[in-house]
Image (tube, rainbow, N blue to C red):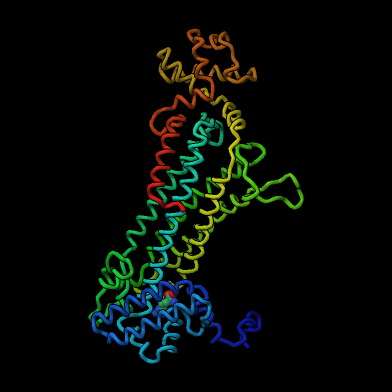
């Protein structure tokens, strides 16, 4: 028995502790597909370059297929004694084939093997995420098209600022997720070089063909420096940073959904599909899915900064510290994918309340800027003066507890005698939003055009399922 205070769990002493801290099979078993694909590419190359005999390669290929089938069918028992996925697969291959299995590891190391497997995994995740982001964009663009003319308050400092449309608000996120997609796509392009053949760290004396394995695994080319190949995880960091930034976007939308669902706002409602009831307050419908998207953004960011901390200060080339790259990355990507699925579902599911949005849009003197713009446009006032006059009109309305359109022409003329009846045409929230036709502005015509343009573009891409 080891230490009396804390050693209870480690009854078998240092050997058991070492095994537990050293193993990665409990979490890297999910790399079996990539591991076997990498081994098959390597094996075919070893035969093509005559480093091993074709007949041995044929046997190894069949053996690898068998191992793959056993894992897929759940007939494989992973062993902690064999540390990781690479040794688990190779050991089973040896059980099946005998000593010929040992030829597979010629001109290779677990260091280039794990870098390859992990890169293949992260690359696949980027592709999957891109499809999910496209699906979310589609849900947002469709909602935007439908509510292109639903006027709502636009906020700055969460104070009512100017009327915008619900569609415009949705389209803001379509743009954010477009940039997120381009970040994942940049990361994918940069990571798409094959580390296989870098071996332990120095390359190999065997006449391997790295172009061949790179091509077989869908990489654009082999990596150019063997030390770099086995010692960097920047591809994972870059992907997690893209997920962190996109997570921030998701979290902001989630926060808005939470606020919009609350009794003080009531801008939207969500169905039972994305809400839960309270065990004590029967009237409650809690936006749990949105809250969890908001929270998980923190979790993704934490995985990113965790991996940054693992990597900083590591000397070249491989260090075992790098085994800690996987759990953080898997957890972040799993959760990010779930966040995207939940957000697409919620956007699809949400029903904006047009009346409530419009009513809220008119509060807080939201069309004050339209008065100032009218004074500039019709009376030719400098904007700064117009701003001042408008301030006095707002103060008048506020003092009488009226909305701007409820003031009489007489009252307005007390502030500025040149004001005419025509000013009332700009005081409604509709006319305010309709007037903002500048490129990228909130006018319903603009929003509809943007939404339809995106829908067409996304349909053409054919990404959303
Ligand atoms: N399981 C290890 C990892 O995930 C594989 C590489 C091990 N290499 C070594 N030299 N011990 O990083």
* The one of 21 and 1 positioned closer to us in this rendering: 21
Vertical relation: 404 (above or below) 418: below
Question: Residue 107 appears in which quarter of the rendering?
Answer: bottom left
The x, y position of residue 386, in whole percent, is 46, 18
* The one of 421 and 271 positioned closer to us in this rendering: 271
Question: Residue 311 appears in which quarter of the rendering?
Answer: bottom left
The x, y position of residue 458, in whole percent, is 41, 46
Side (left or right) of 288 relative to 46: right
Q: Is residue 70 visible?
A: yes
Side (left or right) of 141 relative to 285: left
Q: What is the number of callouts on the image?
A: 0
Which residue is rendered at x = 46% and y = 60% of the image?
304
Q: Quadrant of the N terminus?
A: bottom right
* The one of 56 and 190 positioned closer to us in this rendering: 56
Vertical relation: 446 (above or below) 234: above
* Quarter of the rendered structure image containing ligand 1: bottom left
Vertical relation: 180 (above or below) 393: below
* The one of 116 and 68 positioned closer to us in this rendering: 68
Which residue is rendered at x = 49% and y = 50% of the image?
248
Q: Is residue 320 visible?
A: no
């Amino acid at each position: 028995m080891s230490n009396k205070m804390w050693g209870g769990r480690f009854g078998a002493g240092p050997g058991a502790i070492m095994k537990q801290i050293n193993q990665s099979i409990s979490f890297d078993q999910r790399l079996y597909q990539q591991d076997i694909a990498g081994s098959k590419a390597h094996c075919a190359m070893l035969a093509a370059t005559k480093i091993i005999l074709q007949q041995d390669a044929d046997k190894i290929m069949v053996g690898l297929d068998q191992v793959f089938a056993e894992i897929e069918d759940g007939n494989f028992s992973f062993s902690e004694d064999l540390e990781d996925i690479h040794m688990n697969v190779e050991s089973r291959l040896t059980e099946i084939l005998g000593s010929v299995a040992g030829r597979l590891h010629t001109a290779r190391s677990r260091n280039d093997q794990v870098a390859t497997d992990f890169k293949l995994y992260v690359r696949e995740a980027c592709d999957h995420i891109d499809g999910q982001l496209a699906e979310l964009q589609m849900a947002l663009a469709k909602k935007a098209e439908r509510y292109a003319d639903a006027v709502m308050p636009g906020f700055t400092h969460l104070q009512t600022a100017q009327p915008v449309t619900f569609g415009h608000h949705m389209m803001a996120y379509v743009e954010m997720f477009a940039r997120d997609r381009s970040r994942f796509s940049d990361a994918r392009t940069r990571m798409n070089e094959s580390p296989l053949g870098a071996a332990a760290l120095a390359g190999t004396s065997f006449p391997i063909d790295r172009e061949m394995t790179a091509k077989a695994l869908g990489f654009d080319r082999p990596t150019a420096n063997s030390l770099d190949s086995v010692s960097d995880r920047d591809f994972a960091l870059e992907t997690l940073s893209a997920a962190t930034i996109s997570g921030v976007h998701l979290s902001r939308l989630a926060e808005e959904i939470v606020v919009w669902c609350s009794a003080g706002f009531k801008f939207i409602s969500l169905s039972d599909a994305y809400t839960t009831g309270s065990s004590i307050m029967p009237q409650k419908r809690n936006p749990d899915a949105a809250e969890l998207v908001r929270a998980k953004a923190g979790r993704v960011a934490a995985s990113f900064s965790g991996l940054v901390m693992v990597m900083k200060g590591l000397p070249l080339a491989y260090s075992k510290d790098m085994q800690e790259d996987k759990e953080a990355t898997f957890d972040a990507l799993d959760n990010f994918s779930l966040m995207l699925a939940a957000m697409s579902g919620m956007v699809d599911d949400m029903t904006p309340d047009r009346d409530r949005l419009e009513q809220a849009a008119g509060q807080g003197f939201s069309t004050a800027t339209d008065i100032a713009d009218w004074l500039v446009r019709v009376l030719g006032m400098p904007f700064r003066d117009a701003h001042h006059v408008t301030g006095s009109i707002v103060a008048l309305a506020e003092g009488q507890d009226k909305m701007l359109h409820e003031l009489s022409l007489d009252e307005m003329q007390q502030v500025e005698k040149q004001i005419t009846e025509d000013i009332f045409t700009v005081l409604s929230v509709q006319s305010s939003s309709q007037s903002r036709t500048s490129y990228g502005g909130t006018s319903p015509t603009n929003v509809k055009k943007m939404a339809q343009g995106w829908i067409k573009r996304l349909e053409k891409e054919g990404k959303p399922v």
